[in-house]
Each structure stands twice: as C-alpha cells, then as structure tokens.
C-alpha cells in the first residue's frame, strides 16, 4: 500500500507533538514554582544560611575543615533539620539533630553571624537533639538562640564555646559569650545516662548572657562552666528545684554551689616575694588575684627557720600577733646557705561562704593542695603551713677539684675520678668530666674529632664514630670539666675574684668561663695528654711461618693471645685489610685469611701484623708455587694477556682486550685441543687425539614463519570475493 502525501504529513505532526510533550515533562516542577514560601524558617549553622521547610525533613553534610555545608542524603547527614516534620505533624520550632559533629563559625561580618548556631527569630525555639559528642563554636557567640537540649544516645554530650580569636578581620569582639539567650533554656530527659553534660566555655569568661536560665527536666544531667578554653578550672553546677543556679556567670571562677552554700575550691595568690639574698630582711607582698577580690583575703604570711625535727627556730609573720615574744627567735635577716619555709593563711570574706575540704592554693602560678583546719562546722580558713622552701644562695669564689685522672696508657679507657674539696664543696657539683681527641689541621690548628663525657646522658648523645672508647697510640687528648651550682648558689665572676685549682695546681683565669646566669662554669683544655706506650706482650700462638700453595681453595689461620675487644685492624705487608678479606673470632683472637685474598698474593714471604689498642705483633707466612708446574702471566696495556701453565701438560691462552679473538690451546697426555673464538660468533675446536670438529653458528634473523599458511589465506580471500560478486548479480536480476 502506497502512503499518500497527506497521511505522511499527519504522521509527522503527531511525532513532533509527542516529542514536545516529553520535553516539557522532563522540566523540573520547581521551575514554575512560586519563590515564596511562608512555611520556611531561616537558621545559620557555622555561618551558613539555611532556609528550611518547617514540616519537612532536610539533610545536610557539614565539612568541619572548610566550614561549608551542603544538602545530602539522610545516610550521609551529620546535621538533620526538622526530621520530626517528615511524619506529617505540624511544628512551630526548629529541630536540629547533631550527629558527632563539631560546628565552627568561620566568617560573617554581623555579630549574629559570628555564632556557631544563630536563630534570627528569637521567639522560635531551637531544639538541639544531641547524638554522640558534639560541639558548637562561635567567635562572639557560641549559640545565639533560645535552646532546648535533648540527649539522644548514651554518648551524648554538648560543648558550647565562644572563642574571640575566630572573629573575622576587623570585627571587634570585646566579650565572647558561650550562650546568648533571652528566655529559658531546657535540659530534657531524652536518653538517660549518668555522664550527660552541657559544657559552656568562653575565652573572656562570660558563659551566658541575655537573662536566660537553664531548667533541668532530666534526672541525670550536669551543667559545667569553664573560664578557660582548654576546659580547666571548670565549675559544675547542681540542680536546686529543677533549676541550675548559675548566678553571675561573668564572674564565675573557683566556686561551686553545694546544698545552697557557696564554696571556693581554689585560692589564687599573686605577687608573693619568695626569693631572698644573704642579709635581706623578710618582706610580705602577696595579694589576692584581681579576679577574686572580695571573695577571700590573706590573713598572714610567714617565713620560718626550722630545726632537724621541724620545729621553729626563728620566724617572722606579716601579722604581728604571730611573731615570737622572744626577740632572739625573731627572723630579722636571711643568712646564706640556710633554708627557710613559707606559710600563708587565707580566710573567706563573707560569713556564709566557705572553702572546700581540699582547697588548692595557687601562689605565683604554682599550685599546692591543702587540708584545711576546722573552725566550728565550716571550713573557713586555708592554713598552708611550710608549703615552700627557699635556701639563701651563696656566692662561690673558690673552686677546688682534686683526684682527677690526667694521664693514661695506650688502651686505657677514660674514667671519672674527680672530686670537689674545700669549704664550698657542697655548694656546687661536677656536671661532667670530658676528654677530647684533637686532630691537627692543614693550617696547624687542633680541632676535636672524638669525645668522652663522664655524664652518661651526654655521652649517649654522641654518634658511635665520635666516641672515645680507649686512648690510642700517637694521638693527643685534652681534659675539660663543667661545674654547676646547687640550691640557687652562684659563681662569682673571674673579674671579681673567682679562682680554681685542679689537683692542687692553679688554673689560669683565661681557661675559666662563667655563663650569664652565674650557675655554670666551663673550664676548657686544662690538661693536654698523649697516652704512654707499654711494651707489647702480644704474640702469635698459631700460624707463624705458615704456608699456602697456589691453585688451592684453602685458607690461612692465625691465633694471637690478645683480647678481641681491643683489636683495631690487620695489615699484610703494611697494607690494611678490608673486612671482606678475612674473618675474626674470639679465642683469644683467631684470624682467617680468605682464599680469594690469598690467590691475589705473589709467590714468596709476606708479613701479617695484628694491631690492638695497646700494642701489636707480626708474623711471616709464605705463598708457594703449585707443585710440578710453572705459571707465567703477562699483560700488556694494549689488552693482550698470555698465560702458559705446565703441569703434566701445556696450556696457552691469548686474549685481545679489543674482544676480537681468543685462542686457547691445551695439551694433556699427548692430546691437543685448540679453540678459537672470533667476534662473529664462529668457534672452531680440534682434538688431535680424537679427530676434529668444527661448528659454525649463523646468527638468527627472527623469521621462522611457514610460507604455505600465507598461500592458503590468499586462496580463501579470492573465493570470498567471487561469492560476493555472484550474490550481487542474482539480486539485481530479481529486481
């Protein structure tokens, strides 16, 4: 049936309409949707603006490194917003599920945008559902919203931090606030577990602002406030009638609420004078830390000199009533070398406030745990007795070092023998004795190349090749010593009279160096020494005048009476052997020359020398020619080698280094064999006793194919072409 022109046009029109319908069907509905939706809410998370539907769940992936947030699947999300809305229930608040995520606001020029979480509509509550360990950090505000916190699993914990260092450039953050809230904030029951907590941290010590309270509806929860970013000095607040009594959070430090009574667990003292010199009078300068003024005060300070039983011998107090009545017991001046003890008593400022049973007293940054004295039923005093000691330093003007070992024999190891003597011996100590091996340079100067320290820690820092194990023959060594003060004593300067003796001899002032702190003295190159040589007693026990015959694979064994630990090397004919030319083992010292090394020695007598740290010994040995034969070897620089050996037969070998030809002829038992190899790869061999064999190897071209395979393929191709021609002709005839 023939298709008319009209029917053909109709079919084309229908096809176009169907195509257009399919195209429009693929366009997303959102293209035509209205941009405005009253049923959405805006919230800022990590500085990112999110517009979310209230009655529909949305899922977000927050990148902790970049601070960026993007929509994702429910399985990928670590922030889930309004998940309760997916069940169809209308909601008026915002529900934010945090899943093991740390949110940090990065950027933003407006104050609210410097919050980790910011709700621009304060009348709308933000429900934070906590899954795992979560944190929210902002620059000016950690969270700016009225919140309700709901723990959702046993690992739930929330930390809210305000860190002003995160503020964008040019943004002034005078006061960072962990939580800014104008209404009540709640801790809901959720998943009950004993360690659930909300932690508030701020680098400016303001943890909550705006008038909001924390109301607890959970039976197992705590609220912790810390004035430090590392979480130290944290204060835990306890519920009273379901409400956490936070008080003035901007001033909280070192205090806690327990059973309605305000208590301090720390007393911070600054400005105390704790170090004096010989002849100084006691002074009392301690003050309560500025941030704790009005909480407690210093009742008294005291310095005491104690006897061996801990009883006061002399003392002086900032409170006159505590001073001794006997004038002879009054501490008027500090004396050099004596030890004194510091005490302080701190009392609460208000009658209804107390210290805890264990209060930490912090004096000039150093903390001390104190057990308080009781006063009635309350602990009202911190009485810190003898908590610090101070020894009045001495000026050391005379150094006396004795018994230093300054001469050694070859092979001896350095040793520490020096001792301090004189009236000041207890006022300083030997840090280390030192020996240095000096090496002469081309310009004539001497520089240290190896070292030894009497202090094990210093010696351990040296590489193995830099350590002096034993003093060696014909080498030069210098002796030095380093001294340190004890008990805050100090060395006088050389210019002000410091002197030193070493083994009773005066040390030149130019060799003494006092460091800037006056607590260390360096004395360099006090003694230069070359170890003395002792007559060697080493001898060969085995192997002297031993022999080795060429042509064999055997070794040569020697035994010497020296300790293997003192062995430093082996020479043959004055040349030091390498480790691959011999083996050595104990018993006393057993040395074996390897066959590979012996084969390289010429025929004749050789001398082996065994060297120890404190001596050496030598012995002769012989390399013999193989029995019944002669060996002649000649090599020319041009690359030709000729070798002839006679041993029941004759071998002649000729080699041209240019690689062009090799000729070898051997006569054995009247038979003669000759082999010649040329560069072309032809080898000819003849055996006069058994006939002659000649072999020529032509180089391979790589073409090993069979020509008949290509003939078969050609025939098949021609047949195929003929078949195609016949088919086309028959088909044309049918048409």
Image: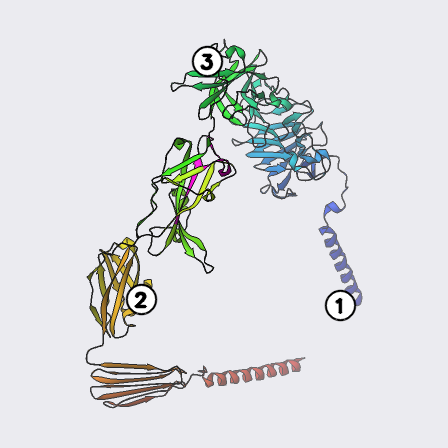
Element marked by disc 1 = loop
Mark 3: give few (<14), some (14-19) or many (20+) Cα within 10 Å: few
Element marked by disc 2 = loop
User: Could you tell me residue 89's position as x and y percent?
Assistant: 66, 31
Mark closest to the chain's N terminus, 2 or 1: 1
From the image, state whether disc 2 or disc 1 is nearer to you. 2
Please say which color scheme the image uses.
Answer: rainbow
User: Could you tell me residue 132's position as x and y percent?
Assistant: 54, 34
User: Could you tell me residue 630's position as x and y percent?
Assistant: 23, 81
From the image, state whether disc 2 or disc 3 is nearer to you. 3
Q: Nearest the camera: 662 or 248?
A: 662
Q: Nearest the camera: 466 or 716?
A: 466
Residue 107: which numbered mark, if any?
none
Q: Which residue is mark 3?
A: 328
Q: Which residue is mark 1?
A: 3
Q: Quadrant of residue 597?
A: bottom left
Mark closest to the chain's N terminus, 1 or 3: 1
Q: Is residue 579 left or right of residue 730?
A: left
For the point 45% across and 81% down, the residue is 702
Q: Which quarter shows the C terminus?
A: bottom right
Mark closest to the chain's N terminus, 2 or 3: 3
Residue 574: which numbered mark, if any?
2
For the point 74% across and 59% down, the residue is 15
Residue segment shown in magenta: 478-498
Element marked by disc 3 = helix
């Amino acid at each position: 049936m023939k298709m008319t022109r009209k029917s053909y046009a109709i079919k084309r029109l229908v096809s176009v309409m169907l195509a257009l319908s399919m195209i429009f069907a693929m366009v997303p509905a959102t293209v035509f949707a209205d941009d405005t939706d009253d049923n959405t809410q805006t919230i800022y998370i990590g500085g990112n603006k999110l517009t979310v539907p209230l009655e529909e769940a949305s899922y977000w992936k927050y990148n902790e490194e970049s601070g960026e947030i993007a929509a994702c699947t429910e399985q990928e999300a670590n922030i889930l917003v309004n998940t309760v809305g997916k069940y169809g229930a209308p909601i008026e608040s915002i529900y934010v599920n945090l899943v093991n995520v740390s949110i940090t606001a990065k950027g933003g020029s407006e104050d609210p945008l410097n919050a980790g979480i910011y709700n621009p509509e304060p009348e709308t509550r933000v429900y934070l559902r906590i899954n795992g360990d979560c944190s929210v950090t902002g620059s000016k505000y950690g969270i700016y919203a009225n919140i309700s916190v709901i723990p959702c699993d046993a690992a739930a914990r929330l930390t809210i931090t305000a860190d002003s260092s995160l503020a964008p450039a040019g943004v002034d953050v005078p006061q960072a606030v962990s939580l800014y809230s104008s209404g009540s904030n709640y801790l809901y029951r959720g998943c009950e577990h004993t360690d659930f907590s909300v932690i508030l941290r701020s680098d400016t010590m303001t943890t909550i602002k705006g008038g909001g309270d924390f109301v607890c509806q959970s039976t197992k929860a705590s609220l912790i406030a810390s004035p430090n970013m590392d979480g130290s000095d944290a204060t835990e607040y306890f519920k009273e009638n379901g409400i956490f009594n936070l008080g003035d959070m901007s001033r909280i430090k070192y205090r806690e609420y327990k059973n309605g009574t305000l208590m301090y667990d720390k007393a911070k003292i600054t400005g105390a004078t704790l170090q004096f010199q010989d002849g100084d009078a006691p002074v009392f300068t301690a003050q309560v830390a500025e941030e704790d003024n009005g909480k407690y005060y210093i009742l008294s300070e005291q310095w005491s000199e104690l006897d061996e039983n801990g009883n006061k011998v002399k003392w002086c107090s900032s409170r006159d009533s505590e001073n001794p009545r006997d004038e002879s017991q009054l501490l008027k001046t500090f004396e050099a070398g004596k030890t004194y003890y510091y005490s302080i008593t701190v009392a609460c400022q208000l009658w209804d406030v107390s210290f805890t049973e264990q209060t930490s007293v912090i004096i000039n940054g150093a903390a001390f745990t104190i057990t308080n004295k009781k006063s009635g039923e309350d602990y009202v005093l911190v009485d810190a007795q003898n908590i610090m000691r101070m020894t009045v330093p001495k000026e050391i003007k005379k150094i006396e070092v004795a018994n230093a070992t300054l001469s050694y024999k070859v092979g001896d190891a350095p040793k520490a023998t020096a001792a301090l003597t004189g009236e000041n011996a207890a006022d300083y100590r030997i840090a280390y004795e030192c020996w240095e091996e000096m090496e002469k340079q081309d310009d004539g100067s001497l520089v240290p190349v190896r070292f030894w320290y009497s202090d094990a820690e210093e010696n351990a820092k040296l590489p193995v090749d830099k350590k002096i194990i034993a003093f060696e023959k014909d080498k030069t060594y210098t002796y030095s010593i380093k001294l340190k003060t004890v008990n805050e004593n100090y060395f006088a300067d050389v210019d002000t009279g410091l002197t030193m003796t070493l083994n009773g001899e005066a040390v030149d002032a130019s060799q003494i160096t006092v460091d800037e702190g006056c607590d260390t003295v360096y004395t360099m190159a006090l003694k230069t020494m070359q170890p003395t040589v002792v007559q060697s007693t080493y001898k060969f026990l085995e192997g002297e005048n031993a022999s080795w015959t060429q042509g064999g694979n055997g070794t040569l064994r020697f035994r010497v009476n020296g300790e293997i630990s003192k062995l430093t090397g082996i020479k043959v004919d004055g040349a030091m052997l390498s480790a691959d030319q011999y083996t050595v083992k104990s018993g006393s010292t057993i040395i074996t020359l390897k066959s590979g090394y012996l084969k390289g020695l010429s025929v004749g007598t050789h001398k082996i020398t065994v060297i120890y740290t404190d001596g050496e010994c030598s012995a002769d040995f012989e390399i013999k020619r193989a029995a019944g034969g002669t060996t002649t070897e000649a090599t020319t620089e041009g690359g030709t080698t000729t070798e002839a050996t006679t041993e029941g037969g004759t071998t002649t070998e000729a080699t041209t280094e240019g690689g062009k030809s090799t000729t070898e002829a051997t006569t054995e038992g009247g038979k003669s064999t000759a082999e010649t190899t040329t560069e072309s790869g032809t080898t000819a061999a003849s055996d006069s006793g058994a006939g002659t064999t000649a072999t020529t190897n032509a180089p391979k071209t790589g073409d090993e194919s069979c020509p008949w395979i290509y003939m078969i393929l050609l025939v098949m191709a021609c047949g195929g072409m003929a078949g195609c021609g016949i088919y086309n002709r028959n088909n044309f005839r049918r048409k």
